[in-house]
Amino acid sequence: MMLQLALIGFGNVGREFARLLLSRREWLRRSEDIDVEVLAIATKRHGSLLSDKALNLERVLHELEEKGTLRGYGPELTELSPLEIIERCDADIMVELTTLNIESGQPAIDHIKAAFRAGMSVITTNKGPLSFAYEDLRGIARSRGAQFRFEGTVMDGTPVFSLVEKTLPGCEITGICGILNSTTNYVLGEMYRGKDMEQALEDAVRFGIAEADPSMDIDGWDAAAKITTLANVLMEAKSSPRRVNRVGIRDLIPEAVTNAAREGRKIKLIAYAERVKGVVKTMVRPELLGPENLFWSVDGTSCAVTLKTDLMGEITVVESNPNLPQTAYAVFSDMVLIADSIKRGVASSS
Amino acid sequence: MMLQLALIGFGNVGREFARLLLSRREWLRRSEDIDVEVLAIATKRHGSLLSDKALNLERVLHELEEKGTLRGYGPELTELSPLEIIERCDADIMVELTTLNIESGQPAIDHIKAAFRAGMSVITTNKGPLSFAYEDLRGIARSRGAQFRFEGTVMDGTPVFSLVEKTLPGCEITGICGILNSTTNYVLGEMYRGKDMEQALEDAVRFGIAEADPSMDIDGWDAAAKITTLANVLMEAKSSPRRVNRVGIRDLIPEAVTNAAREGRKIKLIAYAERVKGVVKTMVRPELLGPENLFWSVDGTSCAVTLKTDLMGEITVVESNPNLPQTAYAVFSDMVLIADSIKRGVASSS
């Protein structure tokens, strides 16, 4: 089968995904009978491309690496906005890779709605739309018979959503807790070893773990958007990041961390979702953990999620120091699962 | 759709599965459009039943609880052997729930072959067939267009096989390690707290964690069969339990455990599978772990598996103190996944 993609947003994740598509092209053909073509690429500052034939991904990557722009690529160059590209592009799947807007989830929500309206399925790594508008988007996807997948939003490519959907039939998720933010986990680990927060944050930015402005991380907004995403999708919470009872690590006293360390304990930023009297309550806060706690050893940029279930008790999934290739794989695996559903003629999932 | 089952082996797991079928009957109908009927039940010592109509599971469970035998159930009582029941039963799925024979994997292997020959799909919780004859059985299943699922063999119902198959498309498993045996994990935990092995084993038997003869556990055979199962299925190892480089905990000196405990370290029985020069090597041995190791806090009867992959790095799955309901759920989830494949008209998996 032929699978045509429109990539809206083409930063580090998009480029890594393009490389993965190239390196797995043969595997996709041989094992999955999928021929992937990219028809559109929208970047924020480096020009956008739109075509009715496959773009040459090697050349796209080469132009960006060598010249830092797509403006010399050829007649496929377009001045259309991402929204217009989605409306005019004849792809099967729109891959939304823009960055999180913690105020509203926009413009990603509009991108996704436009894609569904145009009959496309959607993959996103952006937790904005999931944490602000999941129920709405799922409804539109179902009414249009479109697929909507988003494994990269919370645990990079480590399966959480597909774990529940594909491998735990009939299991109800009754609670969730996890270490969901890499930057704070890294920073708290460095503070545990005696570094101060400022220095640890500088290192995190230098190593590419954190953004230049890491306030989304240390104020707990990133973790809040992720626990909301998990709660909305897996527990039908209908919540938004602002409704999370949120305490970040900005005001954490260094002595609290070092005093805990002296007793062999660590402070970790933990996110929770729990159903209390029928309502899903979400919370993000620093917690003191001893080594008997599974999360104690989840260090560096690693993350972990524990799912509490009715039939299977507690299941914990841990990812070890994920990086770009994992997030790119999230998009890749979502794409293969959508292709599988299209082959089966299944209308809508999630 | 109608789904008819033959249950070969009906001990604790079988009965718990029957209870789960009863309690989820409505969910199966409503959400999955599956009507499940059990046509045959073979027990070792309490009589067997074979019918061309649905057996009354409530009555089966009641007879066993009240009278300890099925011999008063009715005309469905049969003197046929399990193999004959499989051959004559007109079910869609044979559920193999007999216990592990670590010498050969029999008679479960013959049961499974007979079921495939009779055109049935197979679910098993018995790691014998997987560790001794996986390649052979998978070949027969494929040639017959039958499904073969076995989530309960290694981590009870916690998804490992379906995790890889359903959620990690295109990911190669390059190595595996894990705490796979509940009894030794419990015993080592008790020794860590100062108990001697004999007393800890007696407790394990009393609490229903271990069999009356726990030598399968403490000599590492159970862990060996499980790592072989994982390696055969996920790494195409073509191995058997006897080829595992196996050291149990029988000869562990109590002082080794208590000395480690004084330094905050624990001894855990760890199983490994690694590809070395194209060949998969498997190993079971006690190892000294510090609290920085994720497995350090996997205590009690909990188990954990780390999958090393090419595209996703390391993913760890932890199950918390599983019990009968989890293993029964393994059979239940395998059943739903097989039904899903039948609906899709898919021939064979795994």
Image (spheres, coloured by chain):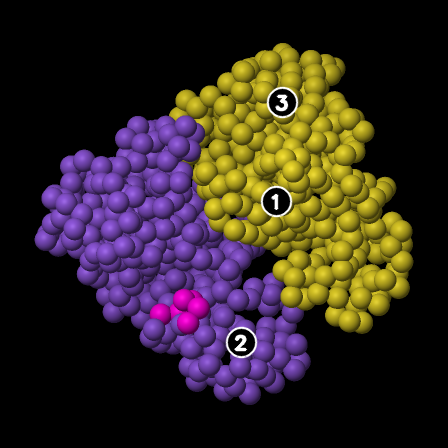
Chain colours: A yellow, B purple
Q: Distance between the residues labelled 1 and 3?
A: 23 Å
**Residue B201 in view in this figure:** yes
- Element type at marker 1? strand
**Closest to the observer: B209 or A331?**
B209
Q: Where in the figure is residue A308, as x and y percent of width and height?
A: 57, 47
The secondary structure making up most of the magenta span is loop
Residue count near mark 2 (Cα–Cα under 10 Å), binned few <14, some 14–19, many ≥20: many
Q: What residue type is labelled 3?
A: Leu
Identity of the residue drawn at 50% across and 37% down: A165
Element on which disc 3 rests: helix
Q: Which chain carries label 1?
A: A
Query: Quadrant location of the N terminus of chain B?
Result: top left
- The residue identified by callout 3 is A137
Residue carrying label 1: A175
Q: Where is residue A263 in the image (x, y as percent from the top left)?
A: 78, 71
Q: Quadrant of residue A242?
A: top right
Judging by the rendered image, the residue that carries numbered circle 2 is: B190
Q: Mark 2 lies on which chain?
A: B
The quarter of the picture where the C terminus of chain B appears is top left
**N-terminal of the two: label 1 or label 3?**
3
Query: In the picture shown, does residue B155 fall above or below B223?
Result: above
